[in-house]
Image (cartoon, helix red, strand yellow):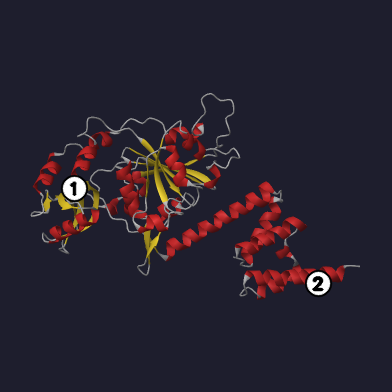
Amino acid sequence: MNYIPWVGQCFLRALSIDDRNSYVVLAAVWAADRESFLEAARDALASQHYTLYWADNVMPANQWIRQQGPDPEAISLARRVSPEHPVELGEVQRHQKDTTDIKTEDWLKHQVLGKVKPLDAQLGTLDPLSVPPSLHPYLFEVSPPSLAEQDLYKNQPQVPPLRTYAVLDTSRVPLLLERLEEANLPFQCLFKGDAEESLKTAAPYLVELKENHKFTRQLFSKTGMASDLWDRYPGVYFRSRALIDQLATHFRRFTKVKNEQGKWLFYRFWDSNFFLVVLKQLSPAKGLAIMPPHLIHSMLCISMDGIDFFKTQSLENIPNVGCELILDDTLYAELHKRSLELFVYRLRQQYVDEKGMNEDLFSDVMSSVELYQFGERETIRKIFDYALAHDENLLGKEELTEELTEKQSMPDSIRLGRLMIKVNRSASHDAP
């Protein structure tokens, strides 16, 4: 392993139970990677009666200086570390404000956008669009730096431009890796090590998008071509002034969650259909950890049933906080509820919009499905197939009420089979 000076911001709490303040210190460590940095920094801080609860912008010193500018403190600390003296700490400083005072609306503005028509084939167009005109301001509009951003990048010759990124899901985009390599756009897999190889068919990729690029156009097109990605809901979109390395390091922290038993699970935070559910369930402090204003300028989330735009706002003297996502019963219930909402949305698209089922019949069938507690999705589709074929609600038949009420403990497929036997017998008795 190649050991060199690494630099990072360390966020601390005192070991004393009487001290409830948060602190920050710049640290330089003779390290080979982020893990060895954290291990050495944690031991050094413990010897000074602090516990490390979060670290940000951890990277080799030369990379830090390129991204953060020629910070005299970082340069001085980095020059003093060596194999014989592996850790050097700067001045421990107290943060003046605690995250318990924060409300989500203090730092995050949410805007629900109207319906957007995806790009068509644009045949005969000399200068084809890359994104629908109504989405351009949220994805590629030039935005002057705020006062907070000017202060953040004061050690650099100029404030970096806003870049546009997407976190894309391999399972939603056929041949994603091959397409990214062909597109020649900067990209990184958010899984590392064994997971990158073993889960490559479902891995997330962070991609820097360019305006007027073929791949960008495909993300927002619906032309009937296999390359179109609009209807696949491939991921979420972010704008940031950070370079892709820094942003990838940030997002990798949120690819796993713990359940209430403490087991680590891979979590697809980049699924646009569920991102809003998670964001609403997080405390404001943990929301800040996922979308810190100094790193994330804004986010666009295009889901099956809506488009949401989020704009972050800087807050002064807010300490960074760790964000260990927990898949508890409340979050699991909300995710399940959202999954059902999307299932019903797809059913309405399939049976009402595409196959012409009467809206009142659809609502009647859906109410009966909920009343009699059908949950197996394939069975529910068969119930709707019956309604479409016979123009009536199978579950609304009076002669089936007793069967529907008494047999709810049975598997749905068996319940439906018993219902169909009763209906067919009744039909044969009524036949002349």
Per the image, the residue denoted by label 2 is: 425
Mark 1, other Cα within 10 Å: few <14 / some 14–19 / many ≥20: many
Residue, disc 1: 7
**Residue 310 % position (x, y):** 41, 43
Q: In the rendered image, which quarter is residue 83 located in?
A: bottom left
Q: Nearer the viewer, residue 113 or 126?
A: 126
Identified at 60% across, 65% down, the residue is: 376
Q: Is residue 44 above or below residue 154?
A: below
Element under disc 2: helix
Residue 364, position as x, y percentages in the image: 68, 58
Q: Residue 236 has which mark?
A: none
Whether residue 245 is visible here, answered yes or no, is yes
The amino acid sitting under disc 1 is Val
Which residue occupies 71% across, 72% down? 418
Decide if residue 336 is on the left or right side of residue 69. Answer: right
Residue 19 showing in the rendered view:
no
**Quadrant (top left/top right/bottom left/bottom right) for the C terminus:** bottom right
Q: Residue furthest top?
A: 126
Q: Nearer the viewer, residue 387 or 247?
A: 247
Q: Residue at x 20, y 37 (%)?
A: 69
Q: Which amino acid type is shown beneath numbered disc 2?
A: Arg
Q: Nearer the viewer, mark 1 or mark 2?
A: 1
Front residue of 429/316: it is 429
